[in-house]
């Protein structure tokens, strides 16, 4: 059974992509893992590292909720998904999970027509790094459709 | 955490009382130089053109053909000085020198000297020293502007920018002392006198108190209860959340409040099927305004309170009604602005998600909550009652923080980490930079310019400060802004009829805090909220924030202005 890894931040704009990746997993009879990576680096920029520990805990609980919502979407679509939470640098966390769960396909959402957090440059670099490091298939989805980036 | 026995509680109370008594006896009683002096005394007072006392001026008495002074003194905090002469010579001149002021020489005539001989004391009339613009003036001004720009454009972290400014001022002054006196701004000893230690200790103690409370889960629990109470009506929910963040910000601080409220509010918003920002942005707006009603609610209030001697009760009495009316208007605007969102509410959430939400909104440490609640209530009581016995708010805050550390025994390393040293260093170095421009006379010039615009009109002064500072605060960080404006308000409060009620300080407090709502970059609570929402795929765009933030800023500023006009009878 193939394993698909899909990192998500769980915002409303990611729902379309979540549905698409659920459909992809269902179609390919693949195991689906939703990944949430939190990073409190923004506190460093603001000069409030003293709150980092509490915020890390809060973000972890928030991530659990966001992924619980994503897993529920999968369940409603008739498929089962797993949730994995990590903290720290996104790329490192992704590589770690790919290795630990022997992921075959990495799916990533591209900035859509609505608000998005990630930029195209960031995505292109990320995809190149993941392909080079893990030698796995990388797919990109935007507004619920697979695209070529 | 073990339960405390009655004996331990009794020991704690005794410790508390003992500490208070020790503080009472340690409060220094004022002493007067003249009490300790003997001989022939020449005394006087020095003021600058704005009527503020001139301190650390060098005063010396000279006799003809003698290079060395026969007596020397330095002006004190109130501008007073006392020269002590061993004998009364035939001719004496008094020389007054002070950096950034024109030197003055007073020749004592025969009558003065006869009086001095007969009475042993000669009082010279109050002297107003004229300022002079030196190279140091321009350098200090340039450093001050550069620091503000570095902070505003985020070229450097605010602490690094302020530290750089303070270092530059001290370096230039050191060069001035050694090579070119006109470069001199102020020395290290003088710079230290501009640091308001009351602010530093109050901020530090409150950081410890907040660090303990933030781990209890009270914020998350309240948010979840608000969700339950609102029964899916998101417009009711947003009003409850706004009310809670306003109160929490007034009692703790708005930064921490938003840090803890944002993740749980985000989950609630998503669970309801609405844009979570429709809950979170109003919360930030309410947190920025709610803090205005207490001394400890915003860093700017701490700064203003400590500098102007405005206590906890004064803020509560003079600001709360204005803040409440502003919050009601804000609530109405929020309901109207997000009216389409309220219609979107989904049917409800699954049992699994509800359980998860409930779990995330639980009280994490009930014992710590009880204890920290008790200590916090006593600390608040200390703020209220302390004023009556002239105990500054920093004292109950330090005692409260200490009692919490002893009673709860949290990991002391974690607590020390919870103290935000970068903020404290920022405050200290910013005080030095603002002190430098005060020293060279820039603030006096600015005050004079504002004074020319507002004249003797108190109402106009309130308007200019509330709206002017509010508008500046939308783009400039409110702490450096308030710190720079304080000496200006000091001057205006002393010169405008009716302003001795300290109304202009309240105007500064309202302007600095309410202005933070204009843009996402206007306040640290806004930025930390944006940081967290980005982590959940719901970033707050600049446009999205200012579309609601800017109108609310001016609505609340105008309400604040009207309230101060009514409260202080300035119509």
Image: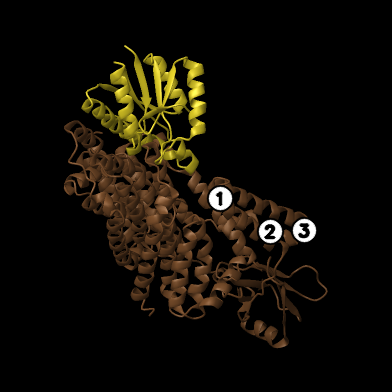
Chain colours: A yellow, B brown
Secondary structure type for disc 1: loop
As rendered, which of B275 and B470 lies closer to the eye?
A: B275
Q: Mark number for residue B16? A: none
Pick whichever of labels 1 and 2 is earlier in the sequence. Answer: 2
Which residue is the site of mark 2?
Answer: B139
Q: Is residue B142 left or right of residue B323?
A: right
Secondary structure type for disc 2: helix
Question: In terms of image quadrants, where is residue B328?
Answer: bottom left
| Tag 1 near tag 2, CB within 8 Å | no
Which residue is the site of mark 3?
Answer: B180
Task: Give the number of the mark in front: 1 or 3.
Answer: 1
Quarter of the image where the C terminus of chain B is located? bottom left
Q: Residue at x 32, y 22 (%)?
A: A24
Task: Give the number of the mark in front: 2 or 3.
Answer: 2
Pick whichever of labels 1 and 3 is earlier in the sequence. Answer: 1
Which residue is at the far top? A1
Which residue is the site of mark 1?
Answer: B153
């Amino acid at each position: 059974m193939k394993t698909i890894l899909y990192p998500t931040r769980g915002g409303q704009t990611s729902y379309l992509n979540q549905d698409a990746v659920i459909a992809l997993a269902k179609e390919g009879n693949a195991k689906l893992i939703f990944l949430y990576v939190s990073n409190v680096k923004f506190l460093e920029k603001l000069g409030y590292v003293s709150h980092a520990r509490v915020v890390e805990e809060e973000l972890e609980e928030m991530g659990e909720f966001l992924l619980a919502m994503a897993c529920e979407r999968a369940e409603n679509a008739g498929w089962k998904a797993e949730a994995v939470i990590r903290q720290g640098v996104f790329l490192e966390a992704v590589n770690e999970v790919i290795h630990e769960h022997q992921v075959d396909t990495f799916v990533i959402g591209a900035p859509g027509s609505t608000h998005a957090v990630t930029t195209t440059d960031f995505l292109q670099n990320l995809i190149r790094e993941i392909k080079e490091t893990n030698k796995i298939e990388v797919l990109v989805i935007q507004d619920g459709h697979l695209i070529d980036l | 955490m073990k339960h405390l026995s009655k004996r331990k509680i009794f020991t704690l109370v005794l410790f508390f009382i003992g500490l208070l008594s020790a503080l009472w006896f340690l409060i220094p009683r004022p002493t007067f130089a003249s009490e300790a002096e003997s001989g022939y005394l020449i005394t006087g007072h020095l003021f600058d053109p704005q009527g503020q006392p001139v301190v650390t001026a060098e005063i010396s008495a000279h006799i003809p053909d003698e290079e060395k002074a026969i007596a020397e003194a330095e002006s004190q905090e109130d501008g007073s000085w006392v020269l002590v002469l061993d004998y009364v010579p035939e001719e004496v001149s008094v020389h007054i020198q002070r950096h950034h002021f024109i030197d003055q020489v007073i020749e004592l005539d025969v009558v003065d000297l006869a009086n001095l001989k007969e009475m042993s004391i000669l009082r010279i009339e109050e002297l107003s020293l004229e300022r002079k613009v030196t190279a140091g003036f321009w350098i200090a001004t340039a450093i001050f502007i550069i620091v503000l720009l570095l902070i505003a454009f985020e070229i450097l972290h605010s602490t690094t920018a302020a530290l750089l400014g303070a270092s530059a001022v001290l370096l230039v002054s050191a060069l001035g002392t050694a090579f070119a006196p006109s470069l001199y701004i102020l020395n290290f000893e003088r710079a230290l006198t501009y640091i308001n230690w009351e602010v530093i200790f109050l901020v530090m103690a409150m950081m410890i108190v907040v660090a303990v409370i933030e781990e209890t889960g009270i914020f998350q629990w309240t948010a979840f209860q608000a969700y339950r109470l609102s029964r899916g009506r998101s417009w009711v929910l947003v009003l409850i959340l706004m009310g809670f963040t306003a109160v929490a910000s007034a009692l703790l601080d708005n930064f921490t409040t938003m840090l803890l409220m944002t993740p749980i509010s985000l989950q609630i918003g998503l669970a309801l099927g609405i844009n979570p920002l429709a809950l979170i942005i109003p919360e930030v707006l309410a947190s920025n305004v709610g803090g205005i009603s207490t001394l400890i609610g915003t860093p700017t209030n701490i700064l203003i309170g400590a500098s102007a001697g405005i206590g906890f009760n004064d803020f509560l009495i003079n600001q709360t009604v204005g803040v409440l009316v502003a919050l009601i208007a804000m609530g109405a605007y929020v309901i109207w602005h997000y009216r389409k969102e309220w219609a979107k509410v989904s049917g409800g959430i699954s049992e699994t998600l509800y359980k998860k939400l409930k779990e995330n909104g639980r009280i994490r440490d009930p014992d710590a909550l009880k204890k920290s609640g008790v200590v916090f209530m006593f600390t608040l009581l200390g703020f209220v009652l302390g004023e009556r016995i002239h105990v500054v708010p920093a004292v109950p805050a330090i005692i409260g923080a200490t009692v919490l550390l002893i009673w709860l025994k949290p990991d002391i390393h974690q607590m020390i980490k919870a103290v935000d040293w970068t903020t404290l260093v920022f405050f200290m170095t910013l005080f030095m930079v603002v002190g430098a421009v005060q020293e060279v006379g820039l603030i006096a010039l600015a005050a004079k310019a504002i004074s020319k615009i507002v004249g003797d009109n108190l109402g106009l002064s309130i308007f200019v400060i509330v709206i002017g500072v509010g508008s500046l605060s939308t783009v400039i960080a409110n702490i450096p802004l308030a710190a720079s404006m304080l000496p200006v308000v000091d001057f205006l409060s002393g010169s405008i009829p009716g302003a001795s009620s300290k109304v202009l300080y309240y105007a500064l407090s309202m302007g600095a805090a309410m202005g933070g709502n204009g843009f996402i970059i206007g306040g640290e609570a806004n930025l930390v909220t944006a940081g967290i929402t980005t982590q959940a795929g719901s970033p707050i765009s600049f446009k999205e924030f200012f579309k609601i933030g800017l109108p609310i800023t001016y609505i609340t500023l105008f309400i604040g202005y009207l309230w101060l006009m009514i409260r202080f009878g300035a119509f």
